[in-house]
Each structure stands twice: as C-alpha cells, then as structure tokens.
Amino acid sequence: MSTRTKISFQTLPTTYSRLVALHTPRPIHDEVGYQNTVEIIDAMAGHNLTPDQDDYLELLSRLVETYETETSPQPKHATGVETLRFLLRENDLTGDGLAKILGVDRSVAFKILKGNRQLTADHIRKLATRFHVSSDLFLKR
C-alpha cells in the first residue's frame, strides 16, 4: 500500500523546467489527469509566484478550463416564463400576486404562467421594475 503526499506550495519547484518535470502539461483526457492538474493549481493559487511558476499556472489553468468545457454539460437557459415562475416562488407570490403586479385579471396571470398567453411589453416593464432585473430575462423562449 502506498501513501501519497499532498503537494504543497513550499515543495513546488520555482523554475519552469522543474515544474514540467514534476507534472508535464498535457491535454487532460480523464478524471485522474484532471484531479492531478487541479491539485497543482490549488497548491499554487494565492501565492507570490515566480514568472516561471506564473506561466506554468496559466498553462495548467487553460488545460483545466478546456477539459471542463468539453466534459461539463452546458446549463439550460431558462425561458421568460420559467424565470417569472422562479421569481414568484422566491418572493412567495402566486398567480394572484402576479395579477396585481401586472394590473390584470387573475385569469390572464394564470394563462401567462401556463404559457397560454405571452407577456406584453407593458407586462415585461412592470416585472423588470418590480423584481429589479433586466427585461431581457422575460424575453427568452
């Protein structure tokens, strides 16, 4: 059984060639390569680095960013109605509260929440003002 010591900043070389000898920068293809690279980044982060260490850290960070972009699912963008539903929930409001904000009959508010009716420009303006958000949030489909 082998024991592995966690890398610390104090044990890291200060020259680029020695850093590369410790952990050769390569494209990351799996979780092990990812974890090994992140461990070195974590050890270097927040310290005063030599120019060689700074270049090495920048390269490793780019490799990790590329791997994460390629392997992480991209978040789904919420539609305007989904955003509206979220804001209502977060503010403990119901369809009745939405009707009051928009100045419409509650049946209109419920149709908007079900997706059976579109928000008008006036509705969007009132919602953006009420929730202090960009009106663009309500325009996404």
Image: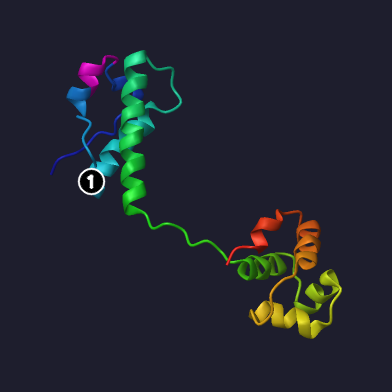
Identify the residue at horizontal 70%, vertical 53% (top origin).
Answer: 134
Identify the residue at horizontal 73%, vertical 82% (top origin).
Answer: 110
Task: Residue at the far front: name it.
Answer: 121
Identify the residue at horizontal 31%, vertical 45% (top origin).
Answer: 67
Quarter of the figure with the N terminus: top left
Q: Looking at the image, can residue 8 be seen?
A: no
Residue 73, by quadrant, is bottom left
Image position, residue 108 (x, y; %): 77, 82
Quarter of the figure with the C terminus: bottom right
Q: Nearer the viewer, residue 19 or 118?
A: 118
Residue 82, by quadrant, is bottom right
**Magenta residues (range):** 14-19
In the shown orientation, is residue 14 left or right of residue 79?
left
Q: Looking at the image, can residue 78 be seen?
A: yes
Image position, residue 76 (x, y; %): 48, 62
In the shown orientation, is residue 103 left or right of residue 57?
right
Task: Residue at the far bottom: name it.
Answer: 107
Question: In the displayed structure, would residue 11 be above or below residue 26?
Answer: above
Residue 23, by quadrant, is top left
Question: In the displayed structure, would residue 24 be above or below residue 51?
Answer: below
Disc 1 packing (10 Å; few <14; some 14–19; many ≥20): few
Q: Nearer the viewer, residue 2 or 48?
A: 48
Q: Nearer the viewer, residue 118 or 86?
A: 118
In the shown orientation, is residue 136 left or right of residue 39?
right
Callout 1, which amino acid? Val
Image position, residue 49 (x, y; %): 39, 17
Task: Residue at the far left: name it.
Answer: 1
Which residue is under mark 1? Answer: 32
Image position, residue 139 (x, y; %): 64, 63
Task: Indicate whether residue 52 is drawn in magenta.
Answer: no
Question: In the displayed structure, would residue 85 be above or below residue 16?
Answer: below
